[in-house]
Amino acid sequence: MKNLTDIEIIESVKKGNHSDFALIIDRYKNKAFSLLTRMLKNEMEAEEVLQDCFLKAFNSLANFRQEAKFSTWFYRIVYNTGLTKLSSTKRKIESEMASIDDHLEIKSEHDFRIAEQKDFSKFIQSQVEKLPVKYASVINMFYLDNMTCEEISEVMETSVSNVKVMLYRSRNELKNLLLKFKYSEELL
Amino acid sequence: MIQLSDELLNKYIDGELEESALKEIHEQLKKSESDRRRLAALQTIHSELASLKMYQVSEDFTSSVMFKVRKNLKVVRKDRNFIFSIVTIFIAISLIIFGYLIDWAIGQSSGIGVLTENINNYVNTFIGSFSIVKDLFTTKNLSIIGSIFSFGIIISGYLFFESLKQSKRNLSKLH
């Protein structure tokens, strides 16, 4: 099948070919699901919220103007719906949504155990899951969705420099953990 | 001894530094083992994050969302048909009443001239200054307006029955 662009698919959906929306779902479902899972820390909730996000996107397609990329527009829906879900479930959002001025520190009881296994990938993946919502979102969008800092700032409605601060802090914290748990000898 | 900042190392990884800054960093890295270690750790993190785990939704996710999309569309269509029916009924009733009033006025008058005079008086009393509206009610215009309203009633009736048929079809599909 011809590799249609997002805009071509959306134009087709707008013309009444509603079943084409399935192409958009297939294209974004796993990436958006990863973002929501890292935000909500719960796969079942993330899937429910993602269904709502796709429905919202479908119902608002008429409002989508091609000034921004579809992915940015859609991720803004996903990110905001994720935040709404977090606040509605009355989690301790204040502690999770640390502002960028707050100190970022990742703590884990299993850090030493994982570190002893000397499995870099497992170790880092497990630490990413423990990042606060905003930091995890930035990491997810930057690495998994290959979004630029500018696009992420549009999604999160914050400045580009804030996004960079969150990205650098996340990397630095992970780097410090890596050095702390004696991986450093293997790095050189 | 100068130590390279984390911000600088991050920018180095992202390729955001200019040639002159790059030279300085390379010089510093040659001198400091600690900086080399920090950079290597950061590069490891960067490459590990590049292969970040992607979570997978359940297999029937797409079909489940599409089912909800279609269901949602049916509800919107039903609502639209309902509003259309109500508007059509309202217009039809208004036109019937207007037609009945015209018919009654003709019945009350002995001739079309008297009728025109009555309508003119009516318009003068209630509208007064709206002379443009008054001018509409001349003998010639009255027959034109009557024809337009009759046509409107026929069209409204047709649309009303069409929407009624469509609603019935939608209901039978739902059952």
Image: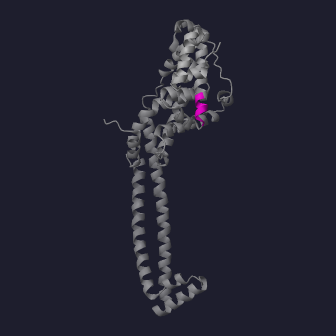
The reply, left or right, for residue B54 in relation to residue A4 is right
Quadrant of the image for the N terminus of chain A? top left
Q: Relative to residue B32, is residue B9 depicted above or below? A: below
Residue at 65%, 20% in the rendered image? A105
Residue at 56%, 89% in the rendered image? B121
The reply, left or right, for residue B128 in relation to residue A2 is right
Is residue A159 on the magenta stretch?
A: yes
Name which quarter of the figure residue A115 lies in.
top right
Q: Look at the image and give the residue range highlighted in magenta.
A: A158-164
Name which quarter of the figure residue A131 lies in.
top right
Q: Looking at the picture, tell me which residue is in the foreground, B81 or B61.
A: B61
The reply, left or right, for residue A55 in relation to residue A19 is right
User: Can you see residue A123?
Assistant: no
Residue at 42%, 56% in the rendered image? B167
Image coordinates for residue B24, horizontal then vertical, percent: 56, 18
Magenta stretch mostly in which secondary structure?
helix
Q: Relative to residue B124, is residue A170 depicted above or below? A: above
Q: Relative to residue A95, is residue B122 depicted above or below? A: below
Image coordinates for residue A54, horizontal then vertical, percent: 48, 39
Image coordinates for residue B151, horizontal then vertical, percent: 40, 74
Count of numbered circles in the view:
0
Image coordinates for residue B112, horizontal then vertical, percent: 46, 91
Is residue A33 on the magenta stretch?
A: no
Q: Looking at the picture, tell me which residue is in the foreground, B140 or B2.
A: B2
